[in-house]
Image (cartoon, rainbow, N blue to C red):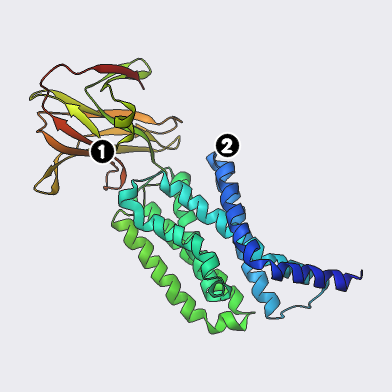
Amino acid sequence: MSIKERYKKIKFFLEKYERFMVPGMLVLGVIADFVTFRSIRISTAFIILGIYLVLAGLAIAFINLVDEKVWSQNLIVKYLRLVAPLAVQFTFGALLSASLIFYWFSGALSVSWPFIIIIALLMMSNEVLREYYLSPSVQISVYFFILFSIFSLMFPFFTNSIEVWVFVAGGIASLAAISIYVRLLSRFIIQIKQQRYLMFWMIGIIFALMNGLYFTNSIPPIPLSLREAGAYHQVVRAGDNYVVQAEAESLLQRLWPGQTIHANQGERIYVFSSVFAPADLKTRIYHDWQYRQNGKWVTRSRPSFAVSGGREAGYRGYSYSTNLAPGQWRVQVETERGQVLGRVRFTVESRAEDVNLIELVK
């Protein structure tokens, strides 16, 4: 078989099974993330994500440069053009799923669901809107969204801060990177030059959307993540551990959302939480105690405690409240600017008799 015939055979195979291979590479990228990021250091994970970002950008540029016939179509170039779309899908899948993993575990889904849904829809739409993804304007717009998301993950780790300026700096850096990228490609690719202003409009809309989600606290407070939280009758520090007193629950009660706390007037109820943060990050965590009154959640108190990062299982702290009225309560574990890491929901009921309490070590 000649080289030319082998090339035609491979091309026929890829075109025939493209509708399976393209989403397959996307799924493979997602699986690679779940396997990789559970077993390596976060700094190594960011190196891998940086490599994915570069490869995705190079693959998009390569596809458009070849289709524009910027250079000669030798056999190596033709082979690379066959596999380049698969490389784009793999890296997009890996980068989007990495964003989904990090953001999923860094905030309450009930608050950050708009951002999580955007990421999930982009992942699913790769197959449903496959023909649209062939357009350079769509490819580059999705690439910018990924750039913004990943930069928003990396900058807090590099700066050891979750201040507003860190998110703003990440957004500006991603905007500068995509602007340089588009301007460079537009010098060689007529289609990108023709669609350049459309791309900048789409990029501007994504930039505004991301900032809108952030300043309405719909983007989770990366790199913080809530490891565990719960309501208890007592929390006591015992050396390097905490001993909590919890009401004994059946298996069904543990599976059912929320807790029931039996307490009389004057008794304290504690909320314990464990928050992970990088080694050099120092911030404050707030417990926003809210009571459901006339169908609305009303804040009753908002105590805080300092967090020093580095502990793999999370930095532990607690707050308590006294004289809680019977009814529905929730405590939101928040950052200083109100980004929600998680919620503890419980119902307070008057105690008519002794409650069976068990001790747990945290």
- Residue 322 is marked as none
Q: Is residue 274 above or below residue 34?
A: above
The residue carrying pointer 1 sits among few (fewer than 14), some (14 to 19) or many (20 or more) residues within 10 Å by Cα, namely many
Give the residue type at disc 2: Ser
Q: Report x, y in % for residue 25.
A: 63, 58
How many numbered tags mark residues here? 2
Q: Is residue 59 above or below residue 74?
A: above
- Residue 39 is marked as 2
Q: Report x, y in % for residue 76.
A: 80, 68
Judging from the image, what secondary structure is the residue with disc 2 in? loop
Q: Is residue 273 visible?
A: no
Q: Residue at x 48, y 52 (%)?
A: 99
Q: Residue at x 45, y 58 (%)?
A: 119
Give the residue type at disc 1: Tyr
Left or right placement of residue 186 versus residue 362 in this view: right
Q: Residue at x 48, y 76 (%)?
A: 199
Looking at the picture, tell me which residue is in the foreground, 184 or 230: 230
Q: Residue at x 27, y 22 (%)?
A: 246
Nearer the observer, disc 1 or disc 2? 2
The residue carrying pointer 2 sits among few (fewer than 14), some (14 to 19) or many (20 or more) residues within 10 Å by Cα, namely few
Judging from the image, what secondary structure is the residue with disc 1 in? strand
Q: Report x, y in % for residue 98.
A: 51, 50
Q: Report x, y in % for residue 161.
A: 39, 44
Badge 1 or badge 2: first in the primary sequence: 2
Query: Which residue does the numbered mark 1 point to in the structure image?
Result: 286
Q: Mark 1 and 2 residues: CB-CB less than 8 Å, in contact?
A: no
Q: Quadrant of the N terminus?
A: bottom right
Q: Quadrant of the C terminus?
A: top left
Alpha-carbon span between mark 1 and mark 2:
30 Å
Q: Is residue 326 visible?
A: yes
